[in-house]
């Protein structure tokens, strides 16, 4: 590990943490109370709230003021600026949870250097948790180092599978069946970025989603790499430009899980 990170990247991570902190507070101030979903449907069971747009606009403006030379890509607005470094934001990941006043959602901001994810901040204000990572310099939860779990036995493992209306039901059910055949304990929590962060922190042994997008995973990829998790080649398999499959797992269980669900790790 080099002694010191590049000042340009270290400064960006600190700036991102502060901006995402403010954005997360904005999201908390706008969070609907517990109850039926408040928002509109983009497609079947795919929710959009006023907060998604407000948080994305807030982060876009702050990053432009701080780093006018950097590119910017948001879930709602697409690529609005280009640059060799590029911020990728999901303003509210877990919108379906947020829209019902639930706690499992986050603001996710990743930094790409070309096609390489180099830094990430995931702030889950309703949980009081902030994940940060810079490639080569570790992954942290609320400032404490994290690492993937040591669980080897699938029969003691907990695996999450992300769901969205983008995946045909038989495909989802086939993978879920394969996971459960291994003897794992299944989960599905509605926030891909936090599920991937859970793999990085050891709270989950694996996460699978058949079709997920770059903004959901950009901040989590550096966390997973720094925490020693194994990850399928999401970016190489189309994730840079569209929806693609991801499997992330602790390194002990990863190969067996990948084989069981037919999602290669390489
Ligand atoms: C969604 C969540 C969900 C995942 C979907 C994503 P959004 O993001 O991460 O857990 O399964 O694929 O689209 O819409 O809440 O930003």
Image (cartoon, rainbow, N blue to C red):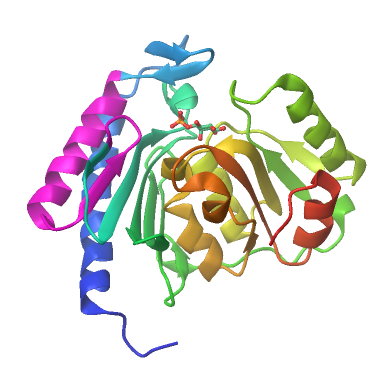
Does 39 lie within the magenta span?
Answer: no
**Where residue 126 sits: x, y (%)?**
41, 37
**Where residue 149 sits: x, y (%)?**
69, 63
Compared to residue 157, the image places residue 91 above or below, namely above
Compared to residue 13, the image places residue 219 above or below, namely above
Camera-side residue of 205 and 127? 205
- The residue at 59%/20% (across/down) is 165
| First to last magenta residue range | 50-78
- The image quarter containing residue 264 is bottom right
- The residue at 45%/87% (across/down) is 1
**Where residue 182 sits: x, y (%)?**
90, 46
- The residue at 48%/14% (across/down) is 43
Image-based side of 187 in relation to 121, left or right: right
Does 73 lie within the magenta span?
Answer: yes
Q: Can residue 38 be seen in this view?
A: no
Camera-side residue of 261 and 1? 261
């Amino acid at each position: 590990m080099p002694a010191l990170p590049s000042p340009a990247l270290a400064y960006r991570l600190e700036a991102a943490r502060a901006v995402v902190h403010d954005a997360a507070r904005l999201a908390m101030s706008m969070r609907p109370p517990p109850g039926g979903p408040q928002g509109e449907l983009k497609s079947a069971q795919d929710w959009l709230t006023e907060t998604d747009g407000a948080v994305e606009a807030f982060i876009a403006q702050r990053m432009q003021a701080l780093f006018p030379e950097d590119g910017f890509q948001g879930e709602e607005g697409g690529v609005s600026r280009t640059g060799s470094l590029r911020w990728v934001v999901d303003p509210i990941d877990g919108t379906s949870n947020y829209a019902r006043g639930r706690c499992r959602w986050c603001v996710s901001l990743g930094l790409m250097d070309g096609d390489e994810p180099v830094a990430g901040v995931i702030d889950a204000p309703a949980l009081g948790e902030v994940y940060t990572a810079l490639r080569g310099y570790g992954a942290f939860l609320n400032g404490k180092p994290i690492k993937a779990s040591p669980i080897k036995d699938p029969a003691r493992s907990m695996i999450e599978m992300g769901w969205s209306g983008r995946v045909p039901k038989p495909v989802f059910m086939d993978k879920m069946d394969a996971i459960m055949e291994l003897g794992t304990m299944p989960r599905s929590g509605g926030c891909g970025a936090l599920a991937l962060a859970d793999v990085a922190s050891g709270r989950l042994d694996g996460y699978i989603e058949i079709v997920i997008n770059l903004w959901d995973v950009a901040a989590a990829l550096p966390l997973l790499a720094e925490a020693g998790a194994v990850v399928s080649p999401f970016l190489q398999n189309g994730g840079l430009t569209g929806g693609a499959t991801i499997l992330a797992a602790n390194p002990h269980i990863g190969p067996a899980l990948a084989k069981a669900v037919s999602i290669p790790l390489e």
